Image (spheres, rainbow, N blue to C red):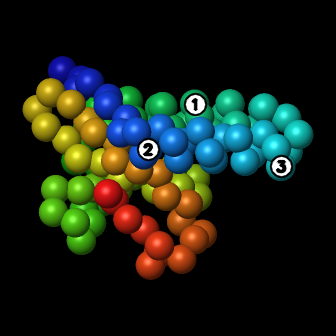
């Protein structure tokens, strides 16, 4: 049974910001559409197989790689909570899961 996927407000904000950045940079929505599809596919995969993500230093938090981005998430029996999306090319000291 697949879990329900719940995007935190922070994850929703970061995803929107990432997609808008690529629209502006490429002057096209094509790449953003593909990237968003990858985010959704990864979240749906996690809903079915939540243990495929790598454990992190944060208790109960796992990470799934999607291109250059990291999806940080937690899960329960009924839901996957996408906490944030992080561009892995950034300084890791900036990362906050709050």
Q: Which residue is mark 3?
A: 25
Quadrant in the picture for residue 81: top left
Residue lying at 83% horizontally and 49% vertically, measured from the top left: 25
Q: Work out whether 18 lies above or below 28.
A: below
29 left or right, relative to 54: right
Q: Give the mark nearer the N terminus: 3 vs 1.
A: 3
Judged from the image, the secondary structure of the residue bearing numbered disc 1 is helix
Q: Residues within 10 Å of mark 1 (few under 14, many from 20)?
A: few
Mark-to-mark CA distance, 3 and 2: 21 Å
Q: Which residue is mark 2?
A: 11
Q: Give the mark nearer the N terminus: 3 vs 2.
A: 2
Residue 52, percent from left and from top: 29, 49
Q: Residue furthest right?
A: 27
Numbered circle sitting on residue 7: none
Q: Residues within 10 Å of mark 3 (few under 14, many from 20)?
A: few
Q: Work out whether 36 lies above or below 22.
A: above
Residue 66, percent from left and from top: 51, 49
Residue lying at 44% horizontally and 78% vertically, measured from the top left: 93
Residue lying at 59% horizontally and 34% vertically, measured from the top left: 36
Q: Quadrant of the C terminus?
A: bottom left
30 left or right, relative to 50: right
Q: Which residue is mark 1?
A: 37
């Amino acid at each position: 049974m697949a879990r329900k996927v719940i995007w935190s407000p922070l994850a929703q904000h970061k995803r929107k910001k990432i997609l808008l950045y690529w629209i502006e940079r490429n002057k096209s929505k094509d790449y953003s559409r593909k990237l968003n599809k990858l985010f959704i596919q990864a979240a749906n995969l996690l809903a079915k197989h939540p243990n495929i993500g790598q454990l992190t230093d944060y208790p109960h938090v796992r990470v799934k790689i999607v291109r250059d981005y990291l999806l940080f998430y937690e899960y329960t029996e009924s839901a996957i909570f996408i906490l944030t999306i992080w561009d892995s090319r950034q300084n890791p000291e900036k990362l906050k899961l709050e």
